[in-house]
Image (tube, rainbow, N blue to C red):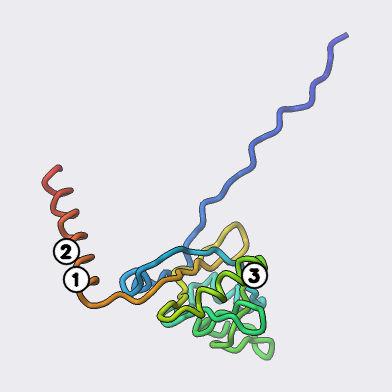
Amino acid sequence: MTQHRPPAAQPAKTEAPRPIATNKKAFHDLAVEYTLEAGVVLVGSEVKSLRAGHCLVQGAHVRVVDGQAQLFGLTIREYAWAHQFNHEAARPRRLLLHKREIERLGRDLQAKGTTAVLARLVWVGSRVKAEIAIGTGKKAHDKRDAIKERESKRDIARAIR
C-alpha cells in the first residue's frame, strides 16, 4: 500500500507595494531621520477614489492628537458615484500605529524643528498604507549640496555607459 502525502505548502505571495501617490518634495525639503509605515482608516468612497488615482499628497502632515496619530492635509477627491454616502475631501484621517510608535512619534514631534510629512501612499494587498517621513527642514545650502551630489552621480553613470 502506498502512502499518501499531503501536497507541499506553497510559499505565501509577497506583493510589492504598488504606489498610489508620492510626495517628491518630502525628501527634497526634509533631512529625513527615519520613516514609518502606517495603515490609514478610510471609508469606502475614499478607497474607490484612491483606486481611480484622485488624491493630492502635497502638504499632508502628521500630528499626534489625544494619543492618536492623525493625518492632516491629505485631499482625496469625492467619488462621483457615491452620492449622499460620499466623504469629505480634506478631513483628518486616523493612522494605525502601535502605541510605542505613536509615543515615539509624539516625543519626536515635540522637539524643535522636527516635522512628520506624508512621503507616499501605497497599496499593500488591498490595504492603503502611508509612509511617513520624520525629520528636520533643510536649509537652502543643504538643498544645493544634494542637487550637486545627484548631478555628479548622474554624470558618473553616463560616463560609465
The residue beneath circle 1 is 144
| Figure check: 75 above or below 95 | below
| Figure check: 87 above or below 34 | below
The answer to whether 59 appears left or right of 72 in the picture is left
Q: Which amino acid does label 3 sit on?
A: Leu
Q: What element carries label 1?
A: helix
Q: Is mark 2 on a helix, strand or loop?
A: helix
The residue beneath circle 3 is 96
* Closer to the camera in the image, 106 or 80: 106
Q: Position of residue 91 (x, y in %)?
A: 58, 87
Q: Where is residue 25 in the image (x, y as percent from the top left)?
A: 34, 74
Q: How would you rate the neighbour count of disc 1 (Cα within 10 Å): few for under 14, some for 14-19, many for 20 or more?
A: few
Camera-nearest label, 1 or 3: 1
Q: Which residue lies furthest to the top in this view?
A: 1
Q: What element carries label 3?
A: strand
Q: Quadrant of the C terminus?
A: top left
Q: Where is residue 78 in the image (x, y as percent from the top left)?
A: 56, 85
The residue beneath circle 2 is 148
Q: What residue type is labelled 1?
A: Arg
Q: In which quarter of the image is the N terminus?
A: top right
